[in-house]
Structures are given as structure tokens and as C-alpha cells.
Image: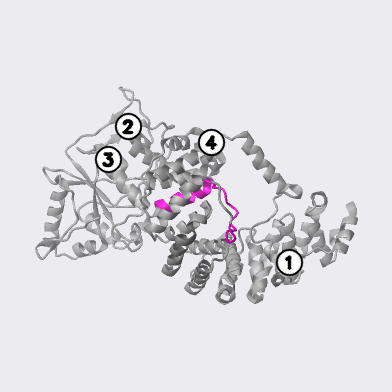
Amino acid sequence: MFACRAAAVFKALTAVAASRGAHGRPKIYDHYFGYFRETDLYRRTTAHSDPELRRFVLSSGAGLDASALSVPELVEATLCCEDASFGRHHGRKIEDECCRRARHLPPLTSVMLMDAWATSLGGKGYLREVVPHWTRYACLAETFDFVHLVYLASLGKSAPESFLHVVADRLRTVLPVCALREVGILCSSLFKLKLRVADDGVLAAVARSAAEGLRSRGDRFDVISALKFLRSCEYYDAKLLAEIAAYVREVGGELAVAECAHFLAAFSSVAAYDGPTFRRLERRVADLLRDPRSTRDGHRAHPAESPRVKDVAKVLWALGHVGHDADNWILETAEEFLERRSALSDVFHVLDALQSFICLDFYPRRLIEEALSADVRHTIVSSLLRKPSKQLAFVRMSALVMLGDALKGGPPLEDPPSSRTDRAQYERDCFRDLADLFAARGLPVSCVLPHIHVAGVTFTVCPSSLTTRPVLDFCDLKGGSKELNLSRDLIDAVSGTRKQRPDGGGSARASTRSTFVSVELLDGGVLVRGSESALRGIMRAKVVQLRRLGVKVVFVTPGQVKAVSELPGVDRDDWWVRFVKRCASDIDPQFYHSVDGGDAVVTT
């Protein structure tokens, strides 16, 4: 599946070569590049060729002296670098001269010069040199000059903190007077610069502009640019989500897969969920994966009209993150697409997709086995990136839990995931109270499934003596229970060992008299927004896997933790005895406490 197809590789290399200028460096063209030249609003900051100056520069030949050029001639020489031959011979010395002059150029001229580089080679060296000098100008620039300035700065994907601070501050005054197109440009640029804004006024202005763009059927690329920025800032706006839902009802049948992914992510990024919207978009995606032909319409400007592996991965993330109950045929369609279209270069997107599949309780065996192959593991280890390494551990451990010894994989992970409870867990609502409540009984919190860092309290109960024992990590599960199911591969994977067994393999079912129980806190960090029981994807995966292993799962709300914590000592002891008895019995255990002689029970 991941083998590179000769024809596809040749096509890709041809496309890359066609988009490169001198020195083989890629040109910087994107959706908004041409817009700056189509309107006079950006006349002051865009570079336009002068035929007379161009003839002069090109006629200089090998004797071109960049240091002797006037500013207009330097701009023209930069534009001439779009010519492959000229750029190959003169591009480096022209860029060096631009860097030398960067601190002395008037602000508008320095912006125009960067625009000229964007037309030809990219001028990343000049961009790094000039952006720090734009900090003061960004404070005073007129609206359209500011928009173009931020756009050009974003071509480098990073900028000094001082510049970003000024940009964030200017947004308060600039955004309210911007049309949707300028909002889209700014949001796209801020997203590339990874600028996170916490100003509710700025974010509300972006949300209003996006909502108006949806109502007026504006350019979807502008709307999506705004949604991406809001998503990166984790900003929740119920009215905007309502507009998206209404928009999808009207034009959902026109959307490309990439657009569906962004609309779904607008909900999932803030843990919001709307069943009808998700079902419409997932069906649209499935239809396009089966028949990728789509009809261009006047509002679509997104360049990705054909489904891509990365787009499908984003769709699956959005569905899985909020625990959407996806139809099996839709997931199978996505699986078939990924098997058909994935290459080794898509390995990180495939890992994203597999993680989401698992959160959706769907296990595409062939994709999982490919992801666990030696070639993929080598690619991930060589990347030195933490996220894909953690994802690979998540996929392998989850697959071993759910598929068992039937899974065809490589050797166990050399470094088993840690079961340590992250400090961030203690910031959850009432989590510390929960930890203190059980710590008093000698039962600390832990991440018993090391690949899922959502902490709870896991312990064993002896039915005869009602004694409890803490379960601190996955290896403690080897003690087993009468219901616990552990494959030998799973035990070896988490312990980092692979011992030869006399019987040559198979499944190991530990059997003791103890029962395993895991108490899980239902707070806003694991629940879908506005719900008291709908689990987000990662928590859903944890519950499914714990139950697959035979562990009884007990849900508890922050209110119940607080109520039990406030009980007098004797009443709290009475609650504990009754709770442990329920855990040891065959009845599904429930976290409860006495209220006027009755039980307040958690239900899901």
C-alpha cells in the first residue's frame, strides 16, 4: 500500500519541477497571491514590472552589479529572478544586496521588495532579515498595507515575538473595518504564523465575519481561513456553529472533502457536536471518496477538489474527537480510500487516521499492520518527532488490546508508554478531590492504559475479603481477574519484553479471584460540550478498551465527588463499604452516596 507508484512519483516530481524557479527553490504562490494584483487597494505594496527597467536589468548580463542598482532597479532585478536563467546567475547576489539594505529601506519599499521576491524565488533570507524591521511599521501601517505586510511575513511560517505582539494588538482596530477577503487573508496568515490570540473582541469579530460570509454565500476559502484561525485559538461561538449547520443544510452537496473537513473541525475543535450536520458531511465525504468527480461552483475556491489522504484524516479526526457514531459503511469507505491512495510519504496522515479510527471503535487491520511494519517505524523514528511516535504507540497498544494475538506486527515497542499521571490531569474539575478521596484508601490515580493519558483510579477488589489493591500501570494487570483478558503480545508490549513461551504463543488469560475496577471522572475535559454523558473520542477509546480487558468502569461526576468528599467521616466509611461491595459483586458498580436514605447514581 505504502509502496511508491512509479507513475504517481513521476507526476509529482514533474509538478514540483514546474513550480520551481532558479536554484530549484519553490515559488511562493497561494490562493491569495493573485488577489493583491487584481485590486488597486494594494498598489502601494505590490511590485509591478517596468518594461524599460526590465530591459536595462536583463541587458546587464554577467556584469550586473547589484550594489550599484537604485531601489527601483533592485525591485525590477528581483522580479527578473522569475526567469530561471537570470535567477540562476544573479539570484543569490541580488538577495544578498536586499538583505544588506533591509534596515535602511523605507517601510513601503521593503514590503514591495518582499512582494517581488514572492513573485520569483521566495527570498526567505531577505524575509528573515526584514521582518524584525517591520515591527514598528506594523504599529502605524494603513489597513491594506498592514494586511499585505502580515501576509508576506507569514510566508516564512514564523516571525519574532515582538512583531507578533504588535500584530495581535493591531487586530483590535483593523479587523472591524475589514471585508471578508481581508479577514480571510489575515486569518490564513496568522494561522501560518501560529499566532494564538486570546482577545475575545478580536475572535468575536472574526466569528461575525465568518458567519456573515456563510449567510451571504461568500468565498468559502475566506470563511475556511477564518474557521482555521478560530480553531487554532479554540474559540467557541454558538451562533457561528449554527450558521455552519444552516449552510451545510443548504449547500452540503457542493462541498469538497477538504471543505467538509474544515466545517467538521469547526465543531470538534471546541468539543461541540451537531448530529445532523455531522451525518450530512460524513455522507458527502463518503460519496466523494467513491466518486471523486465534483462540480465547481462560483463560491468554491479551495484548491483541493480531489480527495487527499490528509483531508480524509482530518475528517476522521473531527468525527472521532467528539465520539460521533459513524456508520460502518462510511468508515469502510474511508479505509478503502486510504488503502488505495496512501504512500509512504503519507505515513503521518495515515497515523492520524488510524488514531481516529480507533477513537471511532473501528480497527482496519490491514492499515494497522502496515503502520506497524519496519519501514514505517523506521520513518517515524528517523523523523525525531514526538507526536507520531506517541500515535504509533497508541495504535499498537490499542490494536493489541482489541485484536489480540491475531495482529501481525513487528517487535514490541522499545520504550513502552509511561503510565505517569500528567500534571495537567490535576487541573480537571474535581480531579484532585477524586485523587484525595481514593488516596485515603491507599488507591492512587494512574493512567493504567499507558497509551491513553486520561487518568482515573484503577484497583482490584477481592470478593471474599473486600480488600482492595491499587493498579498503578498496565503491568499490574498481569495479576488478572476472573474477567480479565490479556494477550501475551500485549503483556510483552507494555513490559518491553518478548519472552519465548513453551507453547509457542497464543493467548494468556489470567485468572484470580480479584475483580478489576476503574473509576473515571466525567468532566468537561472528556465530555462533548453541553452533554453530561456523551464521551469524547479518546475517553470513549479508553472505556471500550478497559471493558474489552474485563475491567469494570465506574463513572463519577464532579458533583458526586464533591458530595462524597463532604460527607462526615462515619458516613464516608459507610459509603466506601457499600461501594466496594457493589464493585465486588456481579452487578455493574456505580459511584453513589447516601442522600436521604437513597442512592444518587451516575448513569451514562
Q: CA distance from mark 3 to mark 1?
A: 65 Å
N-terminal of the two: label 2 or label 4? 4
Query: Is label 1 in a helix, a strand or a loop?
Result: loop
Q: Secondary structure at mark 2?
A: helix
- Write down the region rendered in magenta: 297-320
Residue 293 placement, left or right of 356: right
Residue 308 belongs to the span the image colors magenta: yes
User: Which image quadrant for residue 558?
Assistant: bottom left
Residue 344 sits inside the magenta stretch = no
Task: Name the foreground residue: 405 vs 14.
Answer: 14
Q: Which dot marks residue 413?
A: none
Tag in front: 1 or 2: 1
Dot 3: element? helix
Type of residue at label 2? Arg
Residue depicted at 48% across the width and 57% down the height: 252
Query: From the viewer's perspective, is the residue at label 3 or at label 1 nearer?
Result: 1
Residue bearing the label numbered 4: 2
- Residue 71 at what x, y percent from top left? 82, 67
**Amino acid at the residue labelled 1:** Thr
Q: Nearer the viewer, residue 244 or 510?
A: 244
- Looking at the image, tell me whether mark 3 or mark 4 is earlier in sequence order: 4
Report the residue marked by disc 1.
46
Mark 3 lies on residue: 477
Residue 488 has which mark? 2
Q: Mark 1 vs mark 4: which is more N-terminal? A: 4
Decide which of 364, 473 is in the foreground and name it: 364
| Sequence-earlier tag: 3 or 1 | 1
